[in-house]
Image (cartoon, helix red, strand yellow):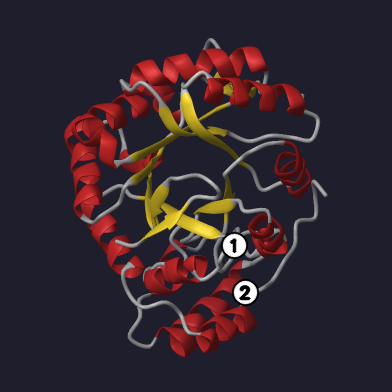
């Protein structure tokens, strides 16, 4: 599988990354998914301390311990479970981040984290303090690089201008083209985007409308989906699968380094890997997709 450079770092990430939130907590099944990912050439594994109360990190660390020097492990911090574990609250403070990293390292069973990410962020956060925490962790050797996971344009601008982030994780798909407003800005500053939600909850897989609900998806109502999804399948797909179209659409943007897709089975891993390993979309295909879908922009967090 091809690899791309992550921002200004020396990390070369596979074009397809594994979003680990959906691998579950059953050890045998989870490890089979991770093993399939490794076999397909995936080297980028994305988790968070929030997932399964930290159990996800333990699974990932254990499954990858024998290939530690060949993989890139990314995790996140900033959300804290409350005592009842029925919900969580936001804490981007320096004190929490510097403590959370130690807990993540212990659960992962590693000496350093390749990419440590702020798991959200608002414009009201103590951003300078948060940046200071990440910079200190980097200088102390606990992390190699850091990034943020955010779709808020105002937060993104702050971190691009004030920090040395190498990546931004953003939800991005044919059905959610809002990031296209800020992707050129991010790319111009030498920062990479890792995308999540590329299949739009399965709507951009070959199951398409089977995954649709009466709520629609973002600004698309159910009737909109009944119109746009078959149109993409008919006019763009040809011999390509919808999964292929969806993942290749993300990879066509020069700002994107890796598409992080979840998988709850080895079959999903194989399908996603096949989709990424095929030929890129042509300019004609890209134009057609863009003519059939909506180029919405973020209405909030300006």
Please say if 119 is above or below 136.
below
Q: Please state the horizontal and vertical placement of residue 47, each as a whole percent of the image.
A: 42, 35
Q: Is residue 87 visible?
A: no
Q: Please state the horizontal and vertical placement of residue 70, each as a whole percent of the image.
A: 27, 41
Judge from the rendering whether residue 244 lies leftward or rightward of residue 168; answer left or right.
Answer: left
Judge from the rendering whether residue 214 lies leftward or rightward of residue 257; answer left or right.
Answer: right
Mark linked to residue 216: 1
Dot 2 falls on a residue whose secondary structure is helix
The N terminus, quarter of image: bottom left
Dot 1 falls on a residue whose secondary structure is loop
Nearest the eye: 262 or 65: 65
Judge from the rendering whether residue 148 lies leftward or rightward of residue 76; answer left or right.
Answer: right
Q: How many marks?
A: 2
- Neighbor class of circle 1 (other Cα within 10 Å; few <14, some 14-19, many 20+) is some
Q: Please state the horizontal and vertical placement of residue 213, each as a whole percent of the image.
A: 52, 60
- Neighbor class of circle 2 (other Cα within 10 Å; few <14, some 14-19, many 20+) is few
* Tags 2 and 1 touching, CB below 8 Å: yes
- Taking the spot 57% from the left edge, 59% from the top edge, the residue there is 172
Q: Can residue 268 be seen in this view?
A: yes
- Taking the spot 24% from the left edge, 43% from the top edge, the residue there is 34
- Taking the spot 35% from the left edge, 19% from the top edge, the residue there is 107
- Taking the spot 75% from the left edge, 37% from the top edge, the residue there is 162
According to the image, label 2 marks what residue?
Answer: 224
């Amino acid at each position: 599988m091809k690899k791309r450079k992550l921002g200004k770092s020396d990390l070369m990430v596979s074009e397809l990354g594994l979003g680990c939130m959906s691998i579950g907590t059953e050890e045998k099944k989870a490890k089979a998914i991770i093993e399939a990912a490794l076999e397909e050439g995936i080297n980028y594994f994305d988790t968070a301390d929030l997932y399964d109360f930290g159990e996800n990190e333990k699974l990932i660390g254990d499954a990858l311990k024998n290939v530690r020097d060949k993989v890139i492990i990314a995790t996140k911090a900033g959300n804290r479970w409350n005592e009842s574990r029925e919900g969580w609250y936001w804490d981007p403070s320096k004190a929490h981040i510097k403590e959370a990293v130690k807990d993540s390292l212990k659960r992962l069973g590693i000496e350093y984290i390749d990419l440590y990410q702020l798991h959200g962020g608002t414009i009201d956060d103590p951003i300078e303090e948060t940046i200071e925490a990440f910079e200190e962790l980097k200088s102390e050797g606990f992390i190699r690089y850091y990034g943020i996971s955010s779709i808020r344009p105002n937060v993104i601008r702050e971190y691009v201008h004030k920090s040395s982030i190498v990546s931004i994780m953003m939800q991005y798909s044919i059905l959610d083209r809002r990031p296209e407003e800020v992707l050129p800005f991010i790319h111009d500053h030498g920062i990479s985007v890792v995308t999540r939600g590329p299949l739009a909850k399965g709507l951009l897989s070959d199951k398409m409308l089977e995954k649709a609900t009466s709520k629609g998806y973002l600004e698309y109502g159910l009737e909109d989906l009944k119109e746009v999804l078959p149109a993409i399948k008919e006019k763009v797909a040809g011999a390509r699968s919808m999964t292929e179209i969806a993942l290749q659409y993300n990879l066509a943007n020069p700002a994107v380094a890796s598409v992080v897709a979840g998988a709850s089975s080895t079959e999903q891993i194989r399908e996603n890997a096949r989709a990424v390993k095929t030929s890129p979309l042509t300019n004609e295909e890209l134009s057609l997709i863009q003519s059939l879908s909506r180029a919405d922009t973020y209405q909030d967090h300006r």
